[in-house]
């Protein structure tokens, strides 16, 4: 994952509607030009405009649009990785590859459903955790009485900019059986698990500890029936211990970026309203809930959306740390499509997985945006105005040298 | 808070002191959580294998050894490093130039189809990168550049987000500057290159940093764009360390040394990046 790239995308997306306005009425010829002059200048403007964007269009078209169309074809073909998928030897199989994922009770569907389950629990834990933690750290860092806030901000942000590969290797060492984390747990008398070979699900473990069920002989009612190639027992496993390590790693690396977004938004909270609320007798918590939190709503939307998009794309950490194991409990759709294509040579099925994943991300972000918007349209409008203000301020700060 | 009346000061001061203390506790605790793994990474890379396993938390290698780095130096690691440098430099230079060109056109040149391209780039930004793994492999094979340097570099040359950063910045540069140059008879490219681009220095630096960091840390694209070990970049080569080439298992000092070397360039840029933005903002405030 490249949290930073996504950050840039996100914050730009959030503000893109804002600053197209100043361009209107620009670059055109002066008012005194004659008709022919205008046309000639228009043509040369057209030409230079297209020349300027041509390289970008070529690269985006060639390595984004065309490949997606190619993969769309492969997802409805029987290509096995040999020869050219676009030659006559490759046949059209309709939706067969998609059916394999959803309707045929076989290993492929089981693998795919397992990866969806894993990723579901992953999202369920990572998105709230990173959002809450980022907000918490931002609120603490926003207290102007604290010293060295710049240092702490950098410290919290640093993991976000470093390589996912380097961090994955470091976490492999930290969480190894005799590693730093288990040593720490040992200090407080806890016998840490063998993180990366522990396939037990968190819900299974908790239920076992609470005496709801025994993890060694799970209730037959749950194991004997199921849906979509997984038993109810398997669906209800929760994230495995190994997946929990990746969850912690991802929360650890992404929080910093989101914290910066919250911090920027917090600095935009009108201080007079906060002070008025305090003078009126509201305590800190109530002031935070009634004044600050509503103001942070658009940032919250952005952070959750980016979180949803990012968490359905976990790949690097799985590739480096676990390759989907133990017992496929860290396999995610993003990793599985890679594995089926490049290791298993099942290109059609793998491409179909990629498009299903695309759809999941698309629907989830759409749904999420819709839910947030529908609830409180007025707050949304206010937020857009605030975002404009913030953007203008940021640009003024960035472009300060120019002025 | 500074407007509180003197009569209420004492109890408030006590509470404030307590809150301050709690604030520092939180900050220090989280700073440890966020930085200690890196300290362990540094310390472990100078440890021996048994020492690393026996004292995983310790920050002082005993005995201190540079053997891991020597082993890296005699492996394929320098080759991976070189590949990463080549790819990162090409991608960064290309991205900054092409994104600026496109961003300028979208911001300032009124040409037919501009709005359509704008919308298209917006749509492109919504495509999740990880679903492009198979598609990218297919197109690189089809173009017959799979397993070459261009395969590693060219697909990364443009990023839609970068185009937007530049577009937004150019939109906020006063038009009068360009018009003065146009009256002097400068062409569009000349205006862009010698007048507008130098003014966009803050945005160019931001984009350079983002591109450098992004391409240096990139993994999935390199996985699908080549299989030749001679074309391994740092991320791809080091990712195979756990299972591969240099042996595996418990050689944590080796993997930590590799992780450290690949973290250092980004860490350096990170430090410079921070300082730049602090001073840049200050300078702007003084002038403005």
Image (spheres, rainbow, N blue to C red):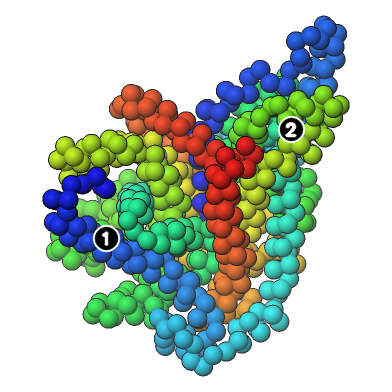
**Which residue is found at the position 56% from the left and 58% from the top?**
B275
| Residue A88 image position (x, y, % from top left) | 74, 38
Kindly identify which residue carries mark 1.
B20
Residue B35's quadrant in the figure? bottom left
Residue found at the very far front of the displayed protein: B6
Q: Secondary structure at mark 2?
A: helix
Q: Can residue B122 be seen from the camera position used here?
A: yes
Q: Residues within 10 Å of mark 2 (few under 14, many from 20)?
A: many
Q: Can residue A113 be seen from the camera position used here?
A: no
Foreground residue among B116 and A158: A158
Left or right: A359 in relation to B187: left
**Which residue is found at the position 42% from the left and 29% from the top?**
A384
Residue A351's quadrant in the figure? top right
Tags 1 and 2 on a common chain:
no
Q: Chain of mark 1?
A: B
Left or right: A198 in relation to A42: left
Q: Nearer the viewer, mark 1 or mark 2?
A: 1
Q: Secondary structure at mark 1?
A: helix
Foreground residue among A34 and B213: A34
Left or right: A384 in relation to B19: right
| Quadrant location, the C terminus of chain A | top right
Q: Which mark is residue A53?
A: 2
Foreground residue among B171 and A94: B171
Q: Chain of mark 2?
A: A
């Amino acid at each position: 994952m490249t949290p930073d790239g996504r950050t840039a995308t996100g914050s730009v997306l959030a503000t893109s509607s804002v600053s197209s306005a100043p361009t209107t009425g620009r670059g055109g010829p002066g008012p005194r030009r004659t008709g022919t002059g205008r046309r000639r200048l228009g043509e040369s403007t057209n030409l230079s405009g297209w020349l300027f964007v041509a390289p970008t269009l070529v690269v985006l078209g060639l390595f984004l649009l065309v490949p997606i169309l190619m993969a769309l074809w492969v997802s409805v073909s029987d290509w096995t990785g040999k020869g050219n998928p676009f030659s006559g030897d490759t046949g059209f199989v309709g939706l067969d590859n998609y059916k394999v994922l959803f309707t045929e009770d076989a290993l492929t569907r089981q693998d795919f459903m397992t990866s969806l389950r894993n990723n579901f629990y992953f999202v369920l834990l990572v998105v709230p955790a990173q959002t809450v933690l980022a907000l918490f750290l931002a609120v603490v860092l926003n207290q102007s009485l604290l010293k060295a806030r710049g240092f702490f901000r950098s410290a919290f942000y640093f993991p976000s900019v470093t390589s996912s590969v380097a961090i994955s290797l470091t976490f492999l060492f930290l969480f190894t059986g005799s590693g730093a984390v288990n040593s720490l747990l040992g200090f407080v008398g806890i016998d840490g698990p063998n993180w990366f070979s522990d396939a037990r699900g968190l819900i299974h473990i908790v239920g076992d500890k609470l005496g709801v069920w025994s993890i060694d002989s799970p209730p037959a009612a749950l194991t004997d029936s199921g849906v979509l190639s997984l038993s109810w027992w398997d669906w209800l496993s929760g994230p495995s211990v190994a997946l929990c390590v990746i969850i912690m790693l991802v929360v650890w690396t992404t929080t910093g970026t989101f914290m910066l977004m919250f911090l920027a938004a917090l600095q935009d909270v009108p201080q007079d309203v906060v002070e008025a609320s305090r003078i009126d007798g509201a305590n800190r918590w109530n002031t935070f809930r009634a004044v600050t939190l509503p103001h942070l709503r658009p940032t919250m939307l952005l952070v959750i959306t980016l979180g949803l998009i990012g968490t359905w794309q976990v790949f690097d950490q799985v590739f480096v740390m676990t390759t989907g194991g133990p017992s496929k409990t860290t396999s995610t759709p993003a990793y599985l499509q890679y594995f089926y294509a490049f290791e298993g040579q099942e290109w059609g099925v793998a491409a179909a997985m990629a498009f299903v994943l695309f759809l999941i991300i698309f629907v989830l972000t759409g749904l999420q945006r819709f839910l947030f918007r529908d609830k409180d349209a007025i707050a949304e409008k206010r937020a857009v105005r605030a975002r404009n203000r913030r953007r203008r301020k940021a640009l003024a700060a960035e472009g300060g040298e120019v002025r | 808070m500074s407007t509180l009346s003197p009569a209420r000061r004492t109890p408030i001061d006590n509470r404030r002191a307590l809150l301050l203390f709690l604030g520092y506790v939180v900050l220090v605790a989280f700073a440890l959580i966020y930085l200690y793994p890196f300290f362990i990474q540094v310390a472990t890379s100078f440890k021996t294998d048994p020492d690393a396993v026996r004292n995983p938390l310790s920050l002082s290698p005993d005995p201190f050894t540079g053997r891991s780095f020597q082993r890296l130096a005699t492996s394929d690691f320098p080759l991976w490093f070189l590949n990463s440098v080549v790819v990162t430099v090409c991608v960064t230079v290309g991205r900054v130039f092409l994104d600026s060109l496109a961003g300028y056109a979208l911001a300032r040149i009124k040409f037919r189809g501009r709005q359509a391209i704008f919308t298209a780039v917006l749509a492109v930004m919504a495509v999740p990168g990880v679903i492009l793994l198979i598609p990218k492999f297919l197109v690189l094979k089809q173009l017959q550049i799979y397993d070459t340097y261009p395969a590693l570099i060219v697909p990364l040359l443009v990023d839609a987000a970068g185009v937007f950063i530049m577009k937004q910045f150019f939109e906020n540069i006063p038009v009068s500057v360009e018009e003065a140059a146009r009256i002097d008879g400068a062409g569009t490219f000349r205006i862009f290159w010698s007048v507008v681009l130098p003014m966009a220095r803050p945005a160019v630096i931001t984009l350079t940093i983002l591109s450098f960091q992004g391409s240096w840390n990139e993994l999935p694209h390199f996985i699908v764009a080549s299989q030749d070990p001679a074309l391994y970049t740092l991320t791809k080569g080091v990712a195979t360390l756990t299972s591969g080439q240099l042996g595996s298992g418990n050689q944590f000092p080796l993997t930590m040394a590799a992780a450290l070397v690949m973290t250092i360039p980004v860490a350096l840029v990170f430090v410079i990046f921070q300082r730049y933005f602090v001073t840049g903002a200050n300078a702007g405030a003084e002038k403005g």
